[in-house]
Image (cartoon, helix red, strand yellow):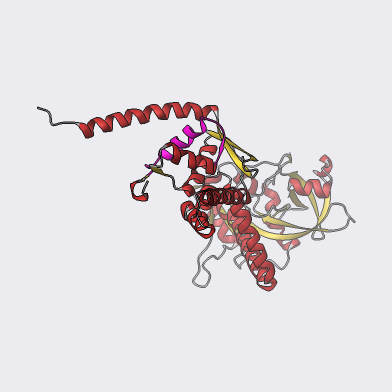
Amino acid sequence: MAETDRIQLLQGTLDLLVLQTLLFGPRHGHGIATAIEQTSEDVLLVDHGSLYPALQRLEQAGLIASEWGVSEKKRRARFYKLTRAGRARLTAETGKWQKMVRAVSRILQAKEAS
Amino acid sequence: MKLRWRTSSELDEEIQAHIDYEIQANLDRGMAPEDARAAALHKFGNATRVKERAREADPLFWIESITRDLRYTLRNLSRSPGFTVVAVLSLALGIGANSAIFSMADGLLLRPLDVPGAGQIVGVSASAPQYRFSRFSYSEYTVYRDQSRTLAGLLAEENNSFAIQPEENAQARYVWGKLVSGNFFDVLGVQPKLGRSFQPEEDSPAAGEIAVVISDECWQDKFHSDPRAVGARIKLNDQPAVVVGVMPPGFRGTEGFTIPEVYAPLAATPHVSPSNTLQPTPSAAIWFYSAA
């Protein structure tokens, strides 16, 4: 896919996507970034740098936890996993997101009332 | 909420690992090594800015930042000891002078006198062309005292230093005290905890032995808290005197700053302080006690 067709993430959606990605098990930072890009079939462009402040923020909020481990390539890496609170937040935020997507879509598709 | 202090080096390591993964992924896609590295760095963005933002998200970030600042400061100061000494000394002197002046102002101006009806006590000074705060002569004092109708009482006092000998031939101790008018304690409304205050005839030229009232501190320090101190024959500036009363702890009269240890009647001035002539030169500071 050409770079120009890719979409910059909406403000505030990175946290939600990080939580969703961790639903399938612990990952390190690079793993999270690539998972988001691949799952979105490379439509979403993750600014890799912005991932780390987000991870720090989520961890301070108690939504994720982290510990050092060894990656599949035998390299030391910090792995992040979803906490119970993170799981609950993900459910709530996903519900809100879907509501908003439906509402925005309805408005964009509305025909003039006859 | 979990507080965990992630060190800078941990974050550095994590970010370095991330970039290495990306380089490897790029190589796997068939990129040339230099391109793989450049692309990975470009994709990550400004690593320094990322580290700053990540650290700011840490609630304990400021500890690391302050520690670093302190260490930097100390290193620089130790490099120029002359400047450091001068700076520390000027700070110390400045702070010391300030607190000294403040405690003086606090005692003299801000803290109320520790006597009943402190709010109704006023100090009075004479004003002459040469001296803004001049004092009254004793004869002026007696006129005001006897003829004032607006004031409940009018006392006069004069600071004086004394050599006190608790017994006839004991070692003399030098203390700070006051020569006061006979109504001093009555006007202030504080009575001795032991013995009595002055009687009218004790502050008159006809008085015999000098009557002395001492502070609680003086009683503890010079008379070993002996209840028999009342009635004790002592020597005050080498003159025979008798202790008639001991004031309660903390009584400081009209003083905010020091605690006078000895009070003697103004009438004893010619005996205990011959160089101080009450008349005709101005000598006694006067405090009015105004009626409510």
Q: Is residue A22 in the magenta section?
A: yes
Quarter where residue A74 is shown: top right
Residue found 59% across the figure and 63% down from its top? B137
Q: Position of residue B235 (x, y in %)?
A: 82, 55
Residue at the image point whose x is 66% and y is 49% from the top: B252
| Location of residue B192 in the rendering, given as x and y in whole percent from the top left corner | 70, 42
In the picture, the quarter occupied by the N terminus of chain B is top right
The residue lying toward the viewer, choosing from B91 and A83, is: A83
Q: Is residue A84 visible?
A: yes
User: Can residue B111 be seen in the rendering of this structure?
Assistant: no
Total count of labels: 0
Q: Measured along the vertical axis of the image, is residue B196 above or below residue B76?
A: above
What residue occupies the far front of the structure in this picture?
A: B30
Seen from the viewer's position, the closer of residues A61 and A38 is A38
Residue B54 forms part of the magenta stretch: no
Q: Is residue B31 above or below residue A80?
A: below
Query: Relative to A44, is B204 on the left or the right?
Result: right
Question: Horizontal and vertical percent for residue B287?
Answer: 57, 53
Which residue is pictured at 89% across the width and 55% down the height?
A: B170
Nearer-the-camera pick, B87 or A4: A4
Quadrant assignment, res B194:
top right
Left or right placement of residue A96 versus residue B42 in this view: left
Q: Which residues are magenta?
A: A8-28
Splitting the image into 4 quarters, where does residue B83 fall?
A: bottom right
